[in-house]
Image (spheres, helix red, strand yellow):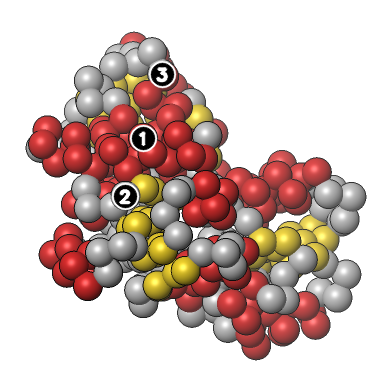
Amino acid sequence: MIKDIQEKILRLKAEKDVCILAHSYMSEEICEVSDFTGDSFALAVRAKSAPQGTVIMCGVRFMAETIKMLAPQKRVILSHPDAGCPMAEQMDKAEIEQLKKLYPDYAVVAYVNTTAQLKSVADVCVTSSSAVKICRAIPQKNILFIPDINLGTYVKNQVPEKNFKLVSGGCPAHAKICKEDAERAKKAHPEALLLVHPECRPEVVELADYVGSTSGITDFAIKSDAREFIIGTENSIVQHLQVSCPDKRFYPLSKDLLCANMKLTTLTDVMRCLEGCGGEEIVLDETLRLQAVKSIDRMIRYGG
């Protein structure tokens, strides 16, 4: 049945000239039928250059919004209308505007995991892989970092020459992992390297052998000479790495490291998007899009 659905998807996307993008947290069967798989911003850049006029984003809403910002001429479909991001939705535009009044000499640096509304009041966006580089590169000495306090703490520690103010927010899945979880996993697998995402708590990050983005963790594990790894990000990465490196062993840092929103999209949802009876087309007000895309353009300028 899975193979039958995959074959139908491949046929329909070719017939209808559609590009399918899958975030790394999607299931293996969805990644197999996608044109590109990766982190949210990498997918948005891919979408901009893809020749197809329609893009299906298998991920969450802020990712589809970012694609629409960078490629307004394309039709962008979010694979599941209810797939949001708790971190992206934790703050609103009015709250950040108030903070900007309190700290007028601070540049607002927004994690790309934010809504279009928040991006419209940010000075620059960052990804987990580019945050340190961009915070070093921007001319402002003072930085108001939103919304992930754990990623903000990690960047602050790497960039001591800047002044940071952090707002309390973050990814619920990564933030609930504690030091005891990491110690328990390391005890159970003493030969394994611990690879974690900087959205994890600082005390978990301190125990890691490698800290990086989802793609960074994946690349490190594939290229490393080590044979065993504890993966401190969404557990779908464990599945993908096991497929990519069957000669190595991968263990989840915690069985609870799951993103419920990412898990909403099924292979059938992707098929229904192609059939024209599923998903949601993303439409952005042009004034909002033009304001929000400025922070993305600056991210590209400073971060590459």
Label pair 1/3, CB-CB below 8 angstroms: no
Quick one: 264 or 85, which is closer to the camera? 85
Q: Quadrant of residue 200?
A: bottom right
Q: Amino acid at mark 1?
A: Asp
Q: Is residue 174 left or right of residue 265?
A: right
The answer for how far apart the CA atoms under marks 1 and 2 are is 10 Å
Decide if residue 255 is in sight here. Answer: no
Nearer the observer, 28 or 105: 105
Q: What label does residue 123 carry, if any?
A: 2
Q: Position of residue 6 (x, y in %)?
A: 46, 30
Residue ID at (72%, 70%):
208
Q: Amino acid at mark 3?
A: Ala
Taking 239 as reference, is 150 above or below it?
A: below
Residues under labels 1 and 3: Cα distance?
18 Å
Element under label 1? Answer: helix
Point out which mark residue 231 bears: none
